[in-house]
Amino acid sequence: MNRLPRLLMLAGAWIACIMGCIGVFVPVLPTTPLLLLATFLFARSSPRCHAWIVSTKVYRTYVAAFKEAGGIPAATKVRILTVSFVLMGASAFFVRKPFVWIVLGCVALFLLYLMLVRIPTISLENVRAARKADEAE
């Protein structure tokens, strides 16, 4: 890959990563999509940065299980939905603007669609078996 596109992707990855971290504390700023974008851009631009982001505990807990076993355990889905809805509710409470409520409502519906329809629910045993098979290779 040429140097300029690689540097632009690396800069975009760091911007997405920083914005995603800020999104933990700032209402309405999307955290998860920004961090997934950062992971994708790191994979395309910097093997070292990609290795760092995929070694984090959050990545291993949520994303790696999905990639390895093809789904997410029910308990993890409940945790994701609970945290997301609590934070979106707090955002809606503090940012009292109807437009923000509409955006949060759309995000909540999309998140429910992902968790209940699109992403398969698997057992914890499937995750453990996939991780053992991955470690054995």
Image (cartoon, grey):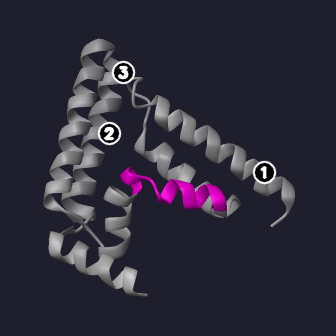
Q: Which mark is residue 107?
A: 2
Q: Which residue is mark 1?
A: 7
Distance of label 1 from label 2 (alpha carbons): 31 Å
Give the quadrant of residue 75: bottom left
Quarter location, residue 40: bottom right
Which residue is rendered at x = 85% and y = 53% of the image? 4
Q: Nearer the viewer, residue 34 or 118?
A: 34
Residue 79 as seen in the image, left or right of residue 37: left
- Label 3 belongs to which residue? 99
From what the image shows, is residue 95 above or below residue 84? above
Label 3 crowd (10 A; few <14 / some 14-19 / many >=20): few
Q: Residue at x 43, y 87 (%)?
A: 137
Query: Regarding mark 1 in the picture, which secondary structure is present there?
Result: helix
Of circles 1 and 3, which is in front?
1
Label 2 crowding class (10 Å Cα cut-off): few <14, some 14-19, many 20+? some
Q: Position of residue 34 (x, y in %)?
A: 50, 43
Is 107 contained in the magenta span?
no
| N-term-proximal mark, 1 vs 3 | 1
| Three-letter residue code for mark 3 | Phe
Q: Picture coordinates of residue 14 (x, y %)?
A: 63, 42
Magenta segment boundaries in residue numbering: 48-59
